Amino acid sequence: MAQPPPTPPDGPPSAKPASSRAARRPAEVPPPAPEEVEAPARSARPRTAATSAAPSPERAAPAAPERAASRAAPRPEAEEAEDEAIETSASEEEEAAAPAARPAPAAAAPAVAPSPTATTGNYHPMLRDKRIGIIGAGAMGSALCRGIVHAGAAPANRILVSDPHTAHVQKLQETLGVKVAESNSQVGKYTDIVILAVKPYMVAPVLDEIRESLRREEGKPLPLIISIAAGVHVAKLEAHLIEPLPVVRAMPNTPAQVGQGACAYCRGTHADDAHLAQAAEIFKSVGTAVEVPEAWMDAVTALSGSGPAYVYLMIEALVDGGVKVGLPREVAHQLAAQTVLGAAQMVIETGMHPAQLRDMVTTPAGSTIEALAALEHSGLRAALIDAVERATNRSRALG
């Protein structure tokens, strides 16, 4: 669906008068500088103070559009406060640059509720000045977007999202206050970090589409490319780029959608420690992240990437077992899920070997040892080991 070009998520350090800016624009107006991104007309939502105002504590409360405009003058002196105020001044510039016959503002839409951390402006130093682009707003792309904002890793008004499904990006815009790009190329052109959150078969076409937009003027740093597509190797990613861009390949998993993900990532040819640190902070916003050699990535895909499916199957079987011995399904479901969650937390927090924790539950001639003997007899341990091995081989074959 065609949309008016959005305002990208970052802009110049200070806002100049709108009239002089408009006068310098050519006949065909390009998208404004990144922090001036304004939510596109696709959502047909009038701006409110919460969507256009800076996330500083004293300005977090919603206000009428006229009041927000009157407070939009660039803030003096402090560079940090100025960055937070840029979006408000950008809204003024957009209004001044619009046609003269613009209709009067409509009634204010419901305010976007900022995350508690985001209102402080205390963003992570590796990300606070970066413009982050996300291509693909499906389950994983949306999870990363929410995680970055809710964890306070980076400002929402510096995140630019594109997706062919309007409803996906509109929901992120309404709930988080992120910006919506008109095209994937806009994401490539106006952001410092580009996250490819698309299906593996779409990676090559998307990179071919955006590679020209990834060029930068001489002296400016090239954008970091982060791919979360399963089985797509660094060499394949770099082969579709015409510049020596830094690349990071990552494998998150679906629990990232509830902030409990497990992700492993590896560096490409041109990625340095700073690029790895930026990628790590993005993935830590939705769980745990660890750097590994690329040679391990197929095993990672089999263990943590596919692992949630193995655990879901085990929970389902435990629930069925509870029902078989007389528990209502709802009760069995609640107890089984919490048991798995609690056991995992015990492993993480105590640092003890799973066998030690198992022995703490097992008493001589008790019911637990009887159950464990049945599981060993049925081959549960061997089945799980075999599952990880087969999934690893399949991942290698797909790559």
Image (cartoon, rainbow, N blue to C red):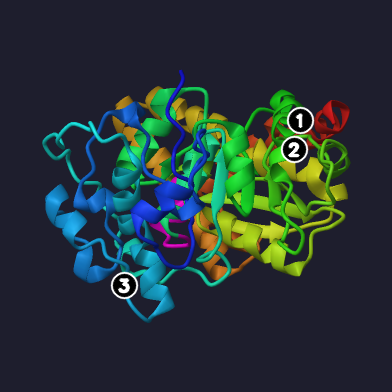
The residue pinned by badge 3 equals: 75
> Left or right: where does residue 171 sit relative to residue 45?
right
Q: Position of residue 135 (x, y in %)?
A: 58, 36
Instruction: Between residue 369 and residue 121, name the one nearer to us.
Output: 121
Q: Position of residue 55 (x, y in %)?
A: 31, 62
Q: Position of residue 260 (x, y in %)?
A: 50, 51
> Left or right: where does residue 394 sit relative to residue 127?
right
For label 1, the SS is: helix
Q: Position of residue 301 (x, y in %)?
A: 73, 40
Residue 244 numbered mark, or none: none
For label 3, the SS is: loop
Q: Which residues are magenta?
A: 146-154
| Amino acid type indicated by mark 3 | Arg
Query: Which residue is drawn at the image coordinates 47% and 39% (left, top)?
Result: 142
Instruction: Between residue 237 and residue 130, name the one nearer to us.
Output: 130
Query: Which residue is drawn at the image coordinates 32% and 38% (left, top)?
Result: 98
Instruction: Measure the alpha-carbon separation of dots 2 and 1.
Output: 6 Å
The relative height of residue 246 versus residue 386 in the rendered view (above or below) is below
Instruction: Between residue 363 and residue 209, name the one nearer to us.
Output: 209
The residue pinned by badge 1 equals: 208
Of the numbered discs 3 and 2, the one sitting upstream in the chain is 3
The residue pinned by badge 2 equals: 211
| Amino acid type indicated by mark 1 | Asp
Query: Answer yes or no: do the residues labelled 2 and 1 have beta carbons within 8 Å?
Result: yes
- Judge depth for marks 1 and 3 and give the one in front: 3
The crowd level at tag 3 (other Cα within 10 Å; few <14, some 14-19, many 20+) is: some
For label 2, the SS is: helix
Q: Is residue 149 magenta?
A: yes
Q: Residue furthest top?
A: 1
